[in-house]
């Protein structure tokens, strides 16, 4: 199979960093779910979580450098004891804050106040809902997840999300295929969720499943690894490269280590062209123009209409 860098070279493309816009914090691997497509391999048994000492150093960097966006993810990031501290510090620094929310966390005892808390701090929500049918959601994410997700969305709507506040939903394909057209899927979601459950939301983001961690294991177990990789490579779209999230996003691990994106973080691929670095050892403008570490999984972000943490790219 052709390498990603070679594919870029054939199209005369150099993938380098631009100005830093988004600081994405992965603050822990613990989650109340264990989804089949999870690139983090998160689950209730994971113990890797950001410490208070690390959170304070991250918060000091945010306060000093004031990134435009602080994007908080996990696992279920809300399970971290540092989540609310980082939300409030980032908002005080003037950042837009995004919570990558799995929805069912709102149904966990002790987290019932999340809709009101997030609304009070005007946190944007990116919520996982891989389909609008219960069969597909429960198959990918576990029995009963769809029903819990719907109840959580209704609570978020009641708190102002989807109207006054940003509530974006995320679609992941069920199985080894590319997402359909984002606008068409969004229209389908609006119709089905509105008609069946009275739910409103801001946008739908389509994200291609990454061939790493649990999803990769599933592909290999089904004998579909090579087929899926061929699908990604054969659908490479050079028009997506300019919008790749790695060009303006910096990923931070739960111990403060830096990566070009959350997917590279899960593979242990540090920043290209240098030794491991911590966030607090770096000034924002140092990385402008530097190369980005890539591997075969990058084809998932450039296949078809493209894929990133902000949805389709082309």
Image: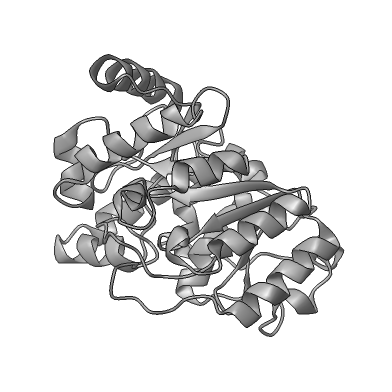
- For the view shown, which residue lies furthest in the bottom direction? 275
Residue drawn 24% across the image and 67% down it: 217
Query: x and y percent of residue 138 in the render?
Result: 17, 45
Residue drawn 49% across the image and 33% down it: 167
For residue 240, side relative to residue 67 (left or right): left
Residue drawn 34% across the image and 39% down it: 152
Q: Nearer the viewer, residue 296 or 167?
A: 167
Quadrant position of the C terminus in the picture: top right
**Rendering quarter of residue 122:** top right
Q: Nearer the viewer, residue 208 or 85?
A: 85
Query: x and y percent of residue 241 in the render?
Result: 62, 45
Residue drawn 51% across the image and 77% down it: 268
Query: x and y percent of residue 4 in the render?
Result: 53, 60
For residue 18, side relative to residue 203 (left or right): right
Quadrant position of the N terminus in the picture: bottom left
Give the answer, above or below, for where 27 lies relative to 76. below
Q: Can you see residue 288? A: no
């Amino acid at each position: 199979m052709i390498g990603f860098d070679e594919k870029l070279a054939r199209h005369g493309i150099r993938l380098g960093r631009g100005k830093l816009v988004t600081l994405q914090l992965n603050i822990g691997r613990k989650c109340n779910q264990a989804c089949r497509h999870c690139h983090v391999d998160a689950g209730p048994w994971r113990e890797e979580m950001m410490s208070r000492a690390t959170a304070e150093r991250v918060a000091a960097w945010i306060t000093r450098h004031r990134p435009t966006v602080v994007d908080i993810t996990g696992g279920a990031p809300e399970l971290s004891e540092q989540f609310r501290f980082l939300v409030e510090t980032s908002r005080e620094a003037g950042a837009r804050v995004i919570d990558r929310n799995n929805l069912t966390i709102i149904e966990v005892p002790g987290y019932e106040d999340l809709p009101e808390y997030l609304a009070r701090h005007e946190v944007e929500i990116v919520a996982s809902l891989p389909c609008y049918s219960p069969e597909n959601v429960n198959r990918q994410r576990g029995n009963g997840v769809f029903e819990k997700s719907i109840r959580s969305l209704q609570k978020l709507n009641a708190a102002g999300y989807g109207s006054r506040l940003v509530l974006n939903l995320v679609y992941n394909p069920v199985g080894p295929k590319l997402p359909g057209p984002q606008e068409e899927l969004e229209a389908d979601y609006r119709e089905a969720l509105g008609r069946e459950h009275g739910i409103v939301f801001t946008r739908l983001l389509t994200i291609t499943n990454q061939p790493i961690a649990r999803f990769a294991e599933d592909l290999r177990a089904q004998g579909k690894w090579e087929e899926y990789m061929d699908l990604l490579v054969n659908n490479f779209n050079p028009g997506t490269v300019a919008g790749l999230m790695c060009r303006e996003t910096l990923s931070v691990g739960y111990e403060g280590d830096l990566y070009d994106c959350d997917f590279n973080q899960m593979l242990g691929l540090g920043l290209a062209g240098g030794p491991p670095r911590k966030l607090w050892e770096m000034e924002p403008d140092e990385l402008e123009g530097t190369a980005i570490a890539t591997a075969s999984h990058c084809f998932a972000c450039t296949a078809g209409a493209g894929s990133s943490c902000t949805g389709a790219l082309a």
